[in-house]
Image (tube, helix red, strand yellow):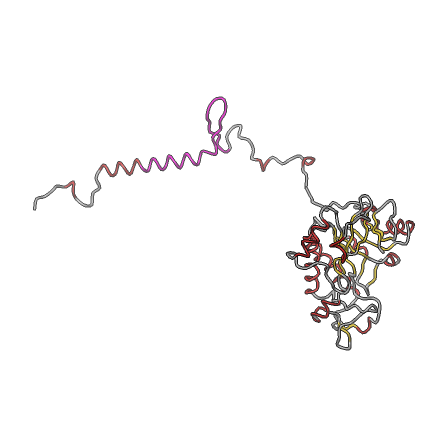
Amino acid sequence: MATKGYQTYRGRMPRWKKALIAVLILILLGAGAFLALQKYQVFDADGIHLRLPGGENEPAPESAQPLPEEDLVIDVKEPEVQELHGRTFDAAALPEETFSALLDEESPVLTMKAANGTLLFGSKEDAAADMVRERIAGKHAVARISCFADTQQAGADTTMALMSVSGSTWKDPEGNAWLSPYAQSVTEYLATVAKECADLGFAEIVLDDVQFPDYGRTERIVYEQGQDSDESRIAAINAFLDAVKTAVGDEVTLSIALPSQLLEDTVNGTAGWDLSAIAQRVDRIYMDAADQTAADSARAAVSALRTDLAGEQFFVAETSQPISGGSYVTVP
């Protein structure tokens, strides 16, 4: 066999391959340098320059240039609660309601969940829900929801109900059964109802019957031994309000209706009320007022609990006739 010479020895690489590899390496290094230095390129009237970190006239990074304190603006979104002039309507008659009784700038107020547990709307996807949306559209409507007084739900699921020593659901003097404010399942159920009302287009939700029963034969209610106290009841009501507020969000005004008698002694541990704590958790407080004088007096007392809000907006008087100088809702 003829010898092809030393140049064909398999352990040696041809010179042209070495040259090609060198060229490729130079191209890769150049591309890498271009990408690395690209962020330091400065374009001005004199052409293109490189301004390397630490170099002369290098501008400080934006993070090293804090805004003057007076220019810092923290945008905290709060619900825009306006003075309310409301008129109560029968929610059961909503399909035929024309709201012709509304005075100028009055809002319709409808009880969407009664104390017996009846809901005046179905699933948010059914025809009843569509009817509600249509009827209240553009009217800044207010929905009232009876919370822990709920005969239907208590009967349907006794694990959610306040039970009597007799083994049946406990009932108040009006014959209504009650749900337990201690039960997490109850909080979740009622928060869902409130959220569904908000989704229907109600601008405000008013919570009624937010309490432990403090009237009737309450001594017959069975509570877990050692777990019930005034303090635990107040904590349960406060936690419930926090949960509902989270459910409806800041776009919807969340209110609570309380008896004016609570102003005489702002804490009622039996019912689970601490008026000062409640005031920090809601956007409005509704209370019954016999006349203008009673409304003005109650407004002054309630407004003192939330000095960050105007009393004309924060307090709503429940009256038989419209009043002046503040929010009101006429009730039958």
Of 149 and 50, nearer the camera is 149
* Residue 131 painted magenta: no
Q: Image check: 323 left or right of 12?
A: right
Q: Position of residue 86 (x, y in %)?
A: 81, 49
In the rendered image, residue 142, in percent from the top left (x then y), is placed at 76, 52
Position of residue 79 measured from the top left corner of the image (x, y, whole percent): 73, 46
Residue at the far bottom: name it: 166
Residue furthest out toward the top: 46
Using the rendered view, name the quadrant where residue 13 is placed. Answer: top left
Q: Residue furthest right?
A: 293
Q: Is residue 49 above or below residue 149?
A: above
Q: Position of residue 98 (x, y in %)?
A: 77, 50
Q: Please tell me which residue is depicted at 11% across the width and 42% down the height of the picture.
A: 4
Q: Residue 143, relative to residue 118: is it above or below?
A: above
Q: Nearer the viewer, residue 2 or 215?
A: 215
Read off the magenta span: 24-53
Seen as rendered, the residue at the extreme left is 1
Residue 235 falls left or right of residue 50: right
At x 83% / y 60%, what residue is drawn? 267
Residue 144 appears in view:
no
Looking at the rendered structure, the number of numbered marks drawn on it comes to 0
In reply to whether residue 42 is colored magenta, the answer given is yes
Residue 107 appearing in the image:
yes
Location of the C terminus (image quadrant):
bottom right
Residue 8 lies left or right of residue 152; in this view the side is left
